[in-house]
Amino acid sequence: MGVRDALLIATGAYSSERLAELRSPAADVVELADVLADPAIGWFQTKQVVDAPAHRATRAIEEFFRNRSTDDLLVLHISCHGVKDDDGLLYFACADTDPELLASTSIPAGFLHAQMGRCRAKSIVLLLDCCFSGAFVPGMKAAIGMDAKEQLAGYGRAVLMATGRTEYAWEGNRFLELEPEPSRFTEAIIHGLRTGEADRDGDGRVAVDELYEHVYERLRESGVKQTPQWSSELVHRVYLANRAISLQSERLSKSGVRIWPQRRARRGQDALILRDISLKDAVTGKVDTISVETAIICGECRGLGTSADSVVERCPRCRGDGLNGEKDCETCTGFGTLIENPCPGCVGDGRVVVRRSIAAKIPAGISTGMRIRLSEQGETGPGGGPAGDVYLEFNELPDDHFERRGMDLHCTTDISAEIARTGGIIDLDTFDGVKKIRISGGVKSGKTVRVAGLGFPRLRASGEVDGRGDLMITVDVRER
Ligand SMILES: [Zn+2]
Ligand SMILES: [Zn+2]
């Protein structure tokens, strides 16, 4: 498996008076990064570059695409003004963009194209949320969707972008609202991933093409005159996210901000566990018991990592601030302190590995690809820090008697020749127990009886079940 990395570049504030301020990009990327990073949804490593000058943005792009392997999945989201020069070349504006010096003060599409072209990853997804309308100022031409496609498309790449040839991008009610309103395009992406509604074929995962369809539909439904564009030369179907079912309190945003000196107590890692689930359990829900090998707090030192007679000393090299320039101090590895005698029970880590079991309530309607989060059921963090989360991802197993087709369950049952002739009631063993099924007279083998509401539960992202499909019973008449 390759890595899943996302780079989000957002520029809303411009030093040039010719580029109008955009209010939403900075707020958008925080939300988009959060949903992409959520282990129940995208499980991407994310990096944000907000309101940066061109040299920082281009550097971030070059770093992002180098040293990759073929199976890495890379998502680059850019939200800013798009500008076109007199030769029709496209540029993404940065905080210091000078409209007279586009090549050196913006992100030229040609530069981005070259970085992607030399990148070995064969799954690159570009999400372009560029406000073209803001570029309609004297002497400047607006960048246009079709040109962006031509200048950025390529093998192993998908491009989703906010606007079409003749339309202006839309930025909410910029002058009326006081709170930053998300761009409709990025909002539709966030919505599709967070709710799982972008999983249009119901396979529990969101492919790039499904995300495009979702964004298209959502913009159309909300009456926004903005037709997103799409072009794909992906080698195989690329999945951006899993369908998250949230059963517990909202996950806290885990920002990647580092502080020095680093605390010895840090949050534990999140873990993903793949679980097979029978069709019956998927229909009815169950309490699952999962045995995991995980780290718990060390009983000997209660997570401190020090032996009873040990002294914690301030690091002499960095004098306790944990820093050497902009990096971790090598002597104390960034902690600012040194432990003379580590705890013998955990060798200073503050935790020990054990096998323990976790009980998890699996809701009815779980199917392949869906993920649920078990808060703080993961490993204890280093230094006795808070526990990480455990995520369960499901794989639905086939059943001997029932087959799921979408939200309906199908089965076949024998009936006697007499019931077939005169009609009557039969007992059928279903996932909901034994049910009385009425058969009308004169049925032949192959005839299907529909029982409403005994099919597969429709599970919403909230964890609520919203109705069920039907049970379709095909009768097989026993001729005697
Ligand atoms: Zn210990
Ligand atoms: Zn130090």
Image (tube, grey):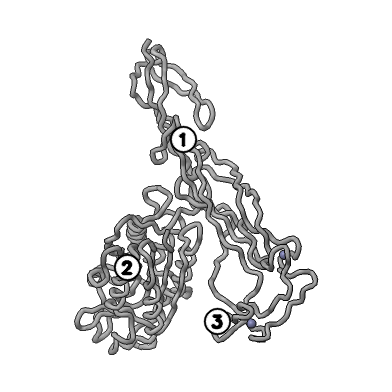
- For the residues labelled 1 and 2, the Cα–Cα distance comes to 40 Å
Relative image position of residue 260 (x, y in whole percent): 61, 80
Question: Which image quadrant: the N terminus?
Answer: bottom left
Is residue 316 left or right of 175 when viewed as pictured?
right
Question: Which amino acid lies under the numbered mark 3 shown in the image of this protein?
Answer: Lys
Residue nearer the viewer, 217 or 68: 68
Say whether residue 155 is visible.
Answer: yes
Above or below for 18 versus 32 = below
Question: Which amino acid lies under the numbered mark 2 shown in the image of this protein?
Answer: Ala
Is residue 222 left or right of 279 when viewed as pictured?
left
- For the residues labelled 2 and 3, the Cα–Cα distance comes to 39 Å
User: Label 1 belongs to which residue?
Assistant: 453
Relative image position of residue 422 (x, y in whole percent): 39, 13
Quadrant of res 145: bottom left
Q: Which mark is residue 162?
A: 2
User: Label 3 belongs to which residue?
Assistant: 327
- Secondary structure under the numbered disc 1 in the rendered image: loop
